[in-house]
Image (cartoon, rainbow, N blue to C red):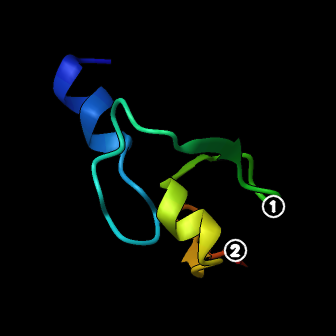
Amino acid sequence: MSESQSTEQRRCISCGLNIAGTNAARFKCPDCGDVIFRCAKCRKQSNLYECDDCGFEGP
């Protein structure tokens, strides 16, 4: 994976914020296992997200 692809994928799935170097969460989608990133603000506010791969929706 190239440097630009790595940075591209490290965006909050809820708000799109680049989360490189922040206190973010990284976890696998409960349905398909795709890696999901969320920023601390969206996690704290329980903002909804949708997995790009399978469409799973979570708080």
Residue 47 shows in this picture: yes
Instruction: Identify the residue under disc 2.
Output: 56
* Marked residue nearer the N-terminal end (1 or 2): 1
Query: Quick one: label 1, few (<14), some, or many (20+) residues within 10 Å?
Result: few
Q: Position of residue 22 (x, y in %)?
A: 41, 38
- The residue sitting at 70% across, 78% down in the picture is 59
Q: Position of residue 21 (x, y in %)?
A: 36, 29
Instruction: Give 18 or 30, whichever is nearer the viewer.
Output: 18
- The residue sitting at 21% across, 19% down in the picture is 3
Query: Quick one: label 2, few (<14), some, or many (20+) residues within 10 Å?
Result: few
Q: At label 1, which amino acid type do we have? A: Asp
Q: Position of residue 54 (x, y in %)?
A: 63, 67
Give the CA distance from mark 1 to mark 2: 7 Å
Contact? badges 1 and 2 (CB < 8 Å): yes
In the image, 41: left or right of 33? left
- The residue sitting at 32% across, 18% down in the picture is 1
Q: At label 2, which amino acid type do we have? A: Phe
In the image, 47: left or right of 17? right
Q: Is residue 2 above or below residue 42?
A: above
Q: Position of residue 48 (x, y in %)?
A: 59, 81
Q: Is residue 16 above or below residue 26?
A: below
